[in-house]
Amino acid sequence: MSTPPPQPPEPRAVDPEGFDPSAIATPANFLTVIRLLAAPLLFAMIVDQPSGWLVWTVWTILSLTDLVDGWVARRWGTTRSGAFLDPLADKVLVLGALFSLVVVDRFPVWPVAIIAVRELGISLYRVYWSRRSLSIPARPSAKAKTLVQSFAVGAVLMPPLTDLTWLADGLLYLAVALAVVSGVQYVRDGSRAASATGHRPH
């Protein structure tokens, strides 16, 4: 009795209007890479002149590009590479701008350091659980934190608001509070999800 020849594996189903989840060369990733490459130029501009219409315009365009590449990703299909690159670009852009303002003595270092430590810690925390097939969804407070951070930077860079130091400082301290609150929420969410699914950290 002859053995039937092995059948080739069936190709993965791909959305005809979108990209395969493993794709790397996508329009959304292209926009994200542009943000990453343009970020050092922005930081140099902030250090050179932390207030002006040109630097504010560059900051605004790069910030809004996050919305554009998010829309493109949803339109053409999200990818694993995009899920990694997009948050990375956000963190590089915002933290780099905040530290640039620390360099020019516009913001104190301690609130920016708190935000940076929180970002690193929660990113590693989410990666830890994702490798154990446990997803921790983004919190509204975390999204609000990112938005407030962007407003804090913009309030320094925009000439009419530059002298209103209380505005940018208030936004920065609000961002610190949201960073701490959202960080605690992420840890609680991870612990609850792990308990519900029987996962245990090790």
Image (spheres, rainbow, N blue to C red):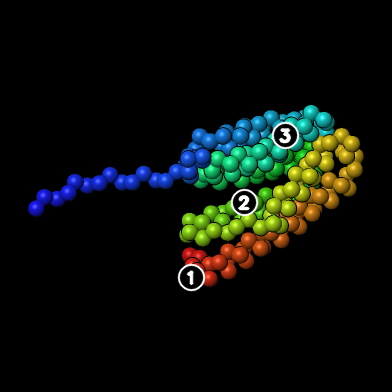
Q: Amino acid at mark 3?
A: Ile
- Label 1 residue SS: loop
**Cβ atoms at labels 1 and 3 below 8 Å apart:** no
**Cβ atoms at labels 1 and 2 below 8 Å apart:** no
Of the pair 30 and 180, the residue shown nearer to us:
30
Residue visible at 90% across and 43% down in the picture: 164
Q: How many labels, in total?
A: 3
Residue visible at 58% across and 64% down in the picture: 190
**Cβ atoms at labels 3 and 2 below 8 Å apart:** no
Residue visible at 56% across and 34% down in the picture: 27
Residue annotated with mark 1: 198
Sequence order check, earlier mark of 1 and 3: 3
Horizontal and vertical percent position of residue 88: 60, 44
- For label 2, count other residues whose C-alpha is less than 10 Å away and answer few (under 14), some (14-19) or many (20+): few
Residue visible at 65% across and 31% down in the picture: 38
Q: Amino acid at mark 2?
A: Leu
**Residue 97 location, quadrant:** top right
Horizontal and vertical percent position of residue 135: 54, 58
Q: Nearer the viewer, mark 1 or mark 3?
A: 3
User: Which numbered dot is residue 61?
Assistant: 3
Horizontal and vertical percent position of residue 120: 62, 51
Sequence order check, earlier mark of 1 and 2: 2
User: Could one spot residue 55 in this view of the protein?
Assistant: yes
Sequence order check, earlier mark of 3 and 2: 3
Is 38 on the left or on the right of 1, as rendered?
Answer: right
- For label 3, count other residues whose C-alpha is less than 10 Å away and answer few (under 14), some (14-19) or many (20+): few
Residue annotated with mark 2: 120
Residue at the far front in the pictured view? 16
